[in-house]
Image: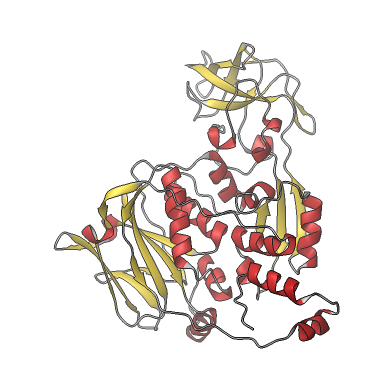
């Protein structure tokens, strides 16, 4: 499980706690830290703006760019195919050292002077996003020409990898780890931002969803992604967890939100549905092996909580799906059937976040910030989960852990971990 300090800070205020202290705490509460890495961007790498781009007179794959560094305009020859005038970019200026024996110097490339380098994400030690340069945006902070990237905290983050045991599915998300830290330090979790961009129509005006004998709990929302675009920090984080796919804003956003809050999310483009009375119809039913599936007529769109199919992002309207199934049920079913599973089964079989409305609301707010609009209403297929009752005394707990903790402190910790306490 990969977390970062800045990512955690979106769920809990840890500004007064060092990363070393956080790692010691995680180890002490059973979340073993496997590694810690500090991302530090080199000095003399600055925010810059590409003012113009012209073809190199003697090289088809090179461009000659005039670049504003804040205190001067300089010329840089760039070989990236995605460089364009008007972009805000990261430039390694003369004297910057990007790695062993890699010092930026003034040079001539095929006879044309070049005074610096427009950088890709990997050249700065960040996850790979593409084969070209990295374009900056305000997700890193205010873009000030000439400001060094090492002075943007969100780009110079501490990356922590936790080795989770199979019984800790509750910590397969940033929210889950933040909840553990909140209980330890007696800190509140940051409340969910509930601001969304409302669409003028409702989900029932474009989708019809039918269910027959399914075990999975489900919540659906309709979203218009017409003006949706992920920002740089979100893309870098998705790349950090190994899920980034270039030019796949919607799929990347689902991976991001699932990693954030632990809710299993999927989406279906409206163009994949069969129309009935001008409504796009989704049928929820079991397949021949007994797995809950989503269908459009006879076309299986996914095996819910088992395997998700890729989809085209050419459509603007999508049906968002949040799902939860008892991990013991789905694990046994997969074992008995011996079927192929996708990455999402790993989370489902260990216990994903059952609070589906929280997951849907989180995604709706997040997607709204990125330009999406949310159709009003939701379609829910939920049942009350029977709560397990544990009868235990403070004396028993102290005996098990080998130290004395006052009853009031035990109650505080359990309440922070979202247990209900009854005398």
Q: Would residue 325 appear left or right of 136 to someone viewing this image?
A: left
* Residue 64 image point, x, y percent: 54, 16
Q: Would residue 400 appear left or right of 127 to someone viewing this image?
A: right
User: In the rendered image, is residue 258 in sight?
Assistant: yes
In the displayed structure, 284 sits above or below 190; it is below
Residue for point 59% across, 86% down: 389
* Residue 94 image point, x, y percent: 72, 18
Q: Would residue 330 appear left or right of 218 to someone viewing this image?
A: right
Residue 155 found in image quarter: top right
In the displayed structure, 76 sits above or below 393; it is above
In the displayed structure, 41 sits above or below 398; it is above
Which quarter of the rendering shows the N terminus?
bottom right
In the displayed image of the protein, which residue is found farthest to the right? 403
In the displayed image of the protein, which residue is found farthest to the left? 277
Q: Nearer the viewer, residue 417 or 299?
A: 417
Residue 262 found in image quarter: bottom right
User: In the rendered image, is residue 314 in sight?
Assistant: no
Q: Would residue 69 appear left or right of 14 to someone viewing this image?
A: left
How many numbered circles are shown? Answer: 0
* Residue 413 image point, x, y percent: 70, 70
Q: Nearer the viewer, residue 7 or 97?
A: 7
Which quarter of the rendering shows the C terminus?
bottom right
Residue for point 72% across, 23% down: 104
In the displayed structure, 140 sits above or below 113; it is below
Q: What's the colour scheme?
A: secondary structure
* Residue 366 image point, x, y percent: 47, 49
Residue 32 found in image quarter: bottom right
């Amino acid at each position: 499980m990969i977390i970062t300090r800045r990512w955690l800070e979106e769920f809990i205020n840890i500004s007064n706690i060092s990363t070393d202290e956080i790692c010691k705490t995680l180890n002490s509460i059973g979340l073993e830290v496997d590694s810690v890495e500090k991302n530090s961007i080199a000095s003399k790498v600055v925010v810059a703006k590409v003012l113009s781009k012209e073809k190199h007179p003697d090289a088809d794959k090179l461009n000659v760019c005039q670049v504003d560094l804040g205190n001067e305009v300089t010329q840089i020859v760039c070989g990236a195919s995605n460089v364009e005038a008007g972009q805000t970019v990261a430039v390694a200026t003369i004297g910057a050292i990007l790695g062993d024996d890699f010092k930026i110097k003034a040079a001539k490339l095929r006879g044309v002077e070049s005074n610096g380098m427009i950088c890709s994400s990997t050249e700065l030690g960040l996850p790979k996003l593409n084969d070209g340069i990295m374009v900056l945006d305000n997700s890193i902070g205010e873009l000030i020409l000439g400001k060094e990237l090492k002075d943007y905290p969100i780009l110079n983050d501490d990356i922590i990898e936790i080795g989770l045991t199979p019984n800790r599915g509750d910590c397969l998300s940033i929210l889950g780890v933040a909840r553990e830290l909140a209980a330890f330090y007696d800190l509140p979790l940051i409340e969910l931002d509930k601001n969304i961009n409302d669409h003028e129509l409702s989900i029932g005006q474009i989708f019809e969803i039918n269910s027959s004998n399914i075990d999975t709990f489900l919540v659906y929302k309709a979203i218009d992604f017409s003006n949706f675009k992920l920002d740089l920090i979100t893309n870098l984080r998705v790349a950090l967890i190994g899920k980034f796919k270039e030019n796949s804003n919607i799929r990347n956003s689902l991976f991001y939100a699932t990693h954030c809050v632990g809710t299993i999310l999927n989406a279906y483009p409206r163009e994949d549905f069969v129309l009935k009375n001008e409504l796009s119809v989704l049928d929820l039913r079991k397949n021949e092996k007994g797995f809950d599936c989503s269908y459009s007529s006879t076309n299986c769109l996914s095996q819910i909580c088992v395997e998700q199919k890729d989809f085209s992002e050419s459509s603007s309207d999508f049906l968002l799906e949040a799902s939860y199934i008892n991990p013991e049920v789905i694990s046994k079913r997969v074992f008995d059937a011996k079927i192929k599973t996708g990455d999402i089964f790993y989370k489902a079989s260990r216990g994903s976040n059952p609070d589906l409305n929280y997951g849907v609301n989180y995604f709706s707010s997040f997607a709204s910030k990125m330009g999406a609009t949310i159709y009003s209403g939701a379609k829910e297929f939920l049942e009350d989960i029977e709560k397990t009752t544990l009868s235990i005394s403070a004396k028993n707990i102290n005996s098990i852990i080998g130290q004395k903790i006052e009853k009031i402190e035990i109650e505080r910790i359990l309440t922070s971990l979202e247990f209900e306490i009854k005398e």
